[in-house]
């Protein structure tokens, strides 16, 4: 399959047929959207991610630096 690219300034004109098709799609309920080809969402977070999110939520483990060099120094990078 080849990729098709357009620039906004070079889009083909919207025909009445295409407008009707877009209107029909807009009127369909979300329940008719087929998500079967999407990869599954990962709902189980690993321990490190959970700990990091909890620390961030309460302001813990936040590094304040004057610039990037200062931050790298604090993180020993």
Image: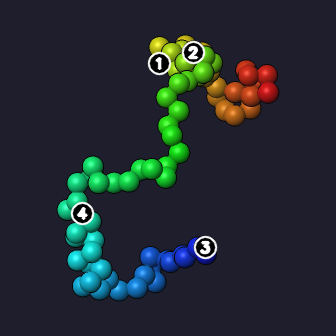
Q: Is 19 drawn above or below residue 56 in the view shown?
A: below
**Mark 4 against mark 2, which lies toward the viewer?**
4
Contact, mark 4 vs mark 2 (Cβ under 8 Å): no
At 79% from the left and 27% from the top, the residue drawn is: 77
1 or 4: tag closer to the N-terminus: 4
Q: Residue 64: x percent and y percent?
A: 60, 22
2 or 3: tag closer to the N-terminus: 3
**Mark 3 against mark 1, which lies toward the viewer?**
3
Q: Is residue 75 left or right of residue 7?
A: right
Q: Quadrant of residue 23?
A: bottom left
4 or 3: tag closer to the N-terminus: 3
* Residue labelled with disc 2: 51
Contact, mark 3 vs mark 1 (Cβ under 8 Å): no
2 or 1: tag closer to the N-terminus: 2
Q: Is 9 drawn above or below residue 72 in the view shown?
A: below
Measure how far apart labels 4 and 2 are at the Cα level.
41 Å
Q: Secondary structure at mark 4?
A: helix
At 74% from the left and 32% from the top, the residue drawn is: 69
Q: Is residue 58 left or right of residue 74?
A: left
Q: Secondary structure at mark 3?
A: loop
* Residue labelled with disc 4: 26
At 49% from the left and 49% from the top, the residue drawn is: 38
**Mark 1 against mark 4, which lies toward the viewer?**
4
Measure how far apart labels 2 and 3 are at the Cα level.
43 Å
Measure how far apart labels 4 and 3 are at the Cα level.
27 Å
The answer to whether one can see residue 52 in this image is no
- Characterize the local packing of mark 1: few (<14), some (14-19) or many (20 or more) Cα atoms within 10 angstroms: few
Measure how far apart labels 3 and 1 are at the Cα level.
44 Å
Q: Residue 74: x percent and y percent?
A: 73, 20
* Residue labelled with disc 1: 57
3 or 1: tag closer to the N-terminus: 3
* Residue labelled with disc 3: 1
């Amino acid at each position: 399959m080849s990729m098709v690219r357009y620039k906004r300034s070079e889009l083909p004109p919207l025909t009445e047929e295409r407008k009707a098709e877009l209107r029909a799609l807009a009127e369909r309920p979300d329940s008719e959207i087929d998500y079967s080809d999407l990869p599954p969402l990962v709902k189980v977070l690993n321990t490190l991610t959970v700990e990091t999110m909890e620390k961030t939520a309460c302001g813990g483990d936040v590094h304040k630096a004057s610039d990037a060099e200062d931050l790298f120094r604090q993180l020993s990078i």
